[in-house]
Image (cartoon, coloured by chain):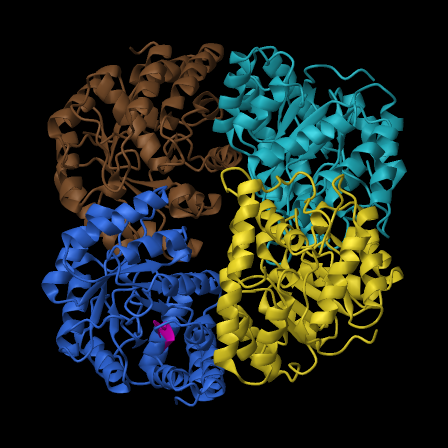
Chain colours: A brown, B cyan, C yellow, D blue
Amino acid sequence: MHHPAPLTGVVPPLCTPLTPDGEVDPGSLGALVERLVTAGVGGLFALGSSGEAAYLSDARRRTALRTVVETAAGRVPVLAGVIDMTTARVLDHARAAAELGADALVATAPFYTRTHPAETAAHFRAIRAAVDLPLYAYDIPSAVHTKLAAATVLELAADGTLAGLKDSSGDDGALRRLLTGLRERGLADTFSVLTGSELAVDGALLAGAHGVVPGLGNVDPDGYVRLYEHARAGRWREAAAEQDRLAALFALTEAGDPALMGGSSSALGGFKAALHLLGVIGCPATAAPQIPLDEAAVKTVRGHLRDGGLL
Amino acid sequence: MHHPAPLTGVVPPLCTPLTPDGEVDPGSLGALVERLVTAGVGGLFALGSSGEAAYLSDARRRTALRTVVETAAGRVPVLAGVIDMTTARVLDHARAAAELGADALVATAPFYTRTHPAETAAHFRAIRAAVDLPLYAYDIPSAVHTKLAAATVLELAADGTLAGLKDSSGDDGALRRLLTGLRERGLADTFSVLTGSELAVDGALLAGAHGVVPGLGNVDPDGYVRLYEHARAGRWREAAAEQDRLAALFALTEAGDPALMGGSSSALGGFKAALHLLGVIGCPATAAPQIPLDEAAVKTVRGHLRDGGLL
Amino acid sequence: MHHPAPLTGVVPPLCTPLTPDGEVDPGSLGALVERLVTAGVGGLFALGSSGEAAYLSDARRRTALRTVVETAAGRVPVLAGVIDMTTARVLDHARAAAELGADALVATAPFYTRTHPAETAAHFRAIRAAVDLPLYAYDIPSAVHTKLAAATVLELAADGTLAGLKDSSGDDGALRRLLTGLRERGLADTFSVLTGSELAVDGALLAGAHGVVPGLGNVDPDGYVRLYEHARAGRWREAAAEQDRLAALFALTEAGDPALMGGSSSALGGFKAALHLLGVIGCPATAAPQIPLDEAAVKTVRGHLRDGGLL
Amino acid sequence: MHHPAPLTGVVPPLCTPLTPDGEVDPGSLGALVERLVTAGVGGLFALGSSGEAAYLSDARRRTALRTVVETAAGRVPVLAGVIDMTTARVLDHARAAAELGADALVATAPFYTRTHPAETAAHFRAIRAAVDLPLYAYDIPSAVHTKLAAATVLELAADGTLAGLKDSSGDDGALRRLLTGLRERGLADTFSVLTGSELAVDGALLAGAHGVVPGLGNVDPDGYVRLYEHARAGRWREAAAEQDRLAALFALTEAGDPALMGGSSSALGGFKAALHLLGVIGCPATAAPQIPLDEAAVKTVRGHLRDGGLL
């Protein structure tokens, strides 16, 4: 698959369906990929946070990525998350992803350690130098506890280290300034800015973002594709209305009781319960040590699917 | 002045011009108010974070608010910040603001203390019960270190405690869900949602926000009024282009060297340097213990004003 | 009262007893002061975090401080908290405290704002210059969200701005390095380091701290005085045993249900419930918007008092 | 090697010496192990934060652990860090460590994800169930961004999941309450509490901690062994004096310029520069993307070694 520059459209961060005993379920994952490609997504992001990359052993990561690449079969580009603490560990994932046929890589800033922006820049440069695939920076302060500085991203965009950014920082002011910065430097037509703020996609596209990486896009890919198409055609009111509907649907990520489980369990459990209720995947299990949604929570998810017109 | 429900439009958080020895300069403040009213703002927010409320003694707060109310002279509503740590202290400010003729109050969640959402709700209820003025919640986690929960805001909107929200959280996903929640409850036509995310105003208005409280609106009120009018008329591309220009201009808040001064000094110093260069105020001084911008930083501010077409 | 340099011993941060309608209760406050002086404390810290300074109007702060100064009557020095956001507001409190007869002032770093260490240093210098009383820095990151840098404290100790430090940062590694730094500069015999880590007082005294400011000292002043005397006499095992007993007693600060109230409500409510059960104060009320302890929580407090041998 | 319960004494978190091209240098690592065993340490902690575990590929982790186990040769127990994001990934490391002959495992709470205390408990239980080695919890909020709750640790101590705790939280108040809680439950004689607060070891031992895991122990193992022996013999003043000397020596972790590099680079670079200057290891290189100390910083490290009597 040729990797377009810039990558545009809806690029869902794929959930990774598991069997009851925690192994990757290739059949369900293939069905999910098929569903998203059919819906008209612009690409697939495997092994991201929504894909439970943090919860998967290396072997399971490889199984998941292999399945996605094979099922996508070149119809859309496959971006592979290479999420780990620092450079050497990320490089091992990056080489594995390249061998498995990924079209691009997605890496976060270092985490667990106390890292300077200059070290973060060196980290991305080392990955780009070692593995010859387009590289996306994944800005996700909620997980790595630092925010990528705009100056760092602009520098790495200008020198060709980065092909794009997945911005899950939720900081739309910073995103705006990054987009104007890219435009000033003549980079806005090639460097791909994908927002992960899945409830403010209309605004991000209006500001010039090239696409969106919505976890909820696993559940309602058609909605996000419509939203994107409305925006591309300048139908902003219609885009906003679609976003409003998706924002209401997003409540399915909060079905889990926060007194009993963490936010990851609730959100990822909600996506998987929805996919299971929709008949896309065979089992709603999430990876250890996440707490499964109980019956009441699953009922809540079903209610949101019904309200959103999906059931 | 009648306080409209919902309040809409551009509601700048007024800078508080000071004399070289740190006293409020009523002449300059009056000139600033006059300039903003002439530009067509929908209201004025005195004694907010941009107004250095945290830096002003009670006496100086009173002087500033009196000046704003007198100069506005009923042409636009005046919202008064009543920023302090907890209920009893806020009440003292609220009573003073009511006596001075404020049209509405703006209060944050408690800070300095470790506060539960139920206590925050009780805080707003106590203020509303004690002083008979419309009350806005000011969501500003960067200052008070908690985020107002959507559930709290919806509850206080429904029971009439709050007339509106000034959202400076920068969390546009949460803002979207609040707006859809207000609509579901039939409150979106009376409860005023004002975004403080001054670089993503087009997106916030598209999502249904009623107005904006932009610190940069002190410097370029005409730009924000144009942006608002474009959005109201559905000219989204033009709104976005105006927002892009303002996002570039916002760089004047970063003229100060972060190795030498805090973010407040740089941002508030940038606004005041700009107002001084534009001839609106007599002196660019900020309140102690802020570090003043040096000559090079002021030159940077001048450059941004020129690039933005204001000089 | 002469203010000793360095101030040593147990310096309890006084609770501020309130009447059921939220006014300061001078009778109860006087009784508390009398009890602590009788127990042999080295000083009294009025209007600190345990004193609910953040919750008291200026008028109530004045009533509280006047009561403490009058009851102490020169038997021990009275330190007055002057807690507010920035310099001008703190100066108003500092002047009031000086007029009311405080022997020393205790100020935090600026809060609510985004402040640089150089601004924090300027803040302390401005306070010291304006009001001629010994000044203590109050390092309390949990409230002000910055940590005082050791370099700043050492600089302000060396130039005479600060007479001492109340360290509520809980960072005993930083405290150790500060103490060794003071010794290297020949300042350890005059600059007073008071730990607020009330559960690790033995270790802090072993490391060279001059005293302790324990909130729990309101409830069990005799225990803290014994602990201090053991340490001063080199009876470290006995000091540790006393600290162990006080650490168990500290559980009374957690009687409140965290699902229902904030940490301040639970801790301050626990201290006041204990003082009420011990017959020291007339009413256990805490200031708005804190949630009162319910009957079950008060019963828990009573159990801890009994286990600790106080009832 | 029999793993003692409780493990006591000085248990240095071994640095991992690297060659100039980033591979593990077994010769240097063996020399370091030999030096520490000779100094009289109570155990060795391989692959911890000081060991750059976050920076090492799986292959390098294995080489390092194999070297440590072989060199220790049963003279002291070897604890192996199994640091990774969540359960499945940690289990892979745990199985590898067991095969390589580690005597115990050290695991953190999950990170990168948003995790509930119940999930953290399930995480430790799953590790203990899958690999039959004593398990230590590693409480390091600066890296994983959550603090282990005392209730969780007490529960997992009581049910035999955990053999001990390495507490790098720096929260000595919480540590004190944990120690009193263990004593109340009759667990203090078997559950090993090792402090990572290497500048407050005297206080931690006075409070009842069983040992210390000092990064600086790589550089000055004799000092930490002396400190531990003084404390065990009740020579608290001598223990404190030794700790004071080590606190001054700790300044070598801050030789790196914070404007140029992160805290990890400076601290780990300082340890390795010191070991290189002392002739223990062949090369002071740290793993990518860390920034190396420059000549001036190395000179500063040398000065601290000289002041500390080590050169």
Q: Is residue B232 left or right of residue B30?
A: left
Q: Nearer the viewer, residue B308 or D56?
A: D56
Percent coordinates x, y for residue D206 in the rendering? 44, 76
- The part of the image, by quadrant, that contains residue A31 is top left
Q: In terms of image quadrants, where is residue A122?
A: bottom left
Residue C31, percent across and down?
76, 59
Q: Furthest-front residue in view? A: C311
Q: Residue at x 47, y 74 (%)?
A: D203
Numbered marks: total: 0
Quadrant where the C terminus of chain A is found in the figure? top left
| B246 and B20: which is toward the camera | B20
- The answer to if D215 sits in the magenta stretch is yes
Q: Relative to residue B205, is residue B145 depicted above or below?
A: below
Frontmost residue, A219 versus D173:
D173
Query: Which region is colored magenta?
Result: D211-216
Q: Position of residue C239 (x, y in %)?
A: 52, 76
Q: Is residue B30 visible?
A: no
Q: In screen coordinates, is A258 left or right of B155?
A: left
Q: Quadrant of the N terminus of chain A?
A: top left
Q: Is residue B216 magenta?
A: no
Q: Is residue D57 above or below residue C178?
A: above
In the picture, measured across the screen, residue B179 lies left or right of residue B272, that is left
Residue A134 is situated, as x and y percent measured from the top left of the image, at 27, 39
Viewer can see residue C230: yes
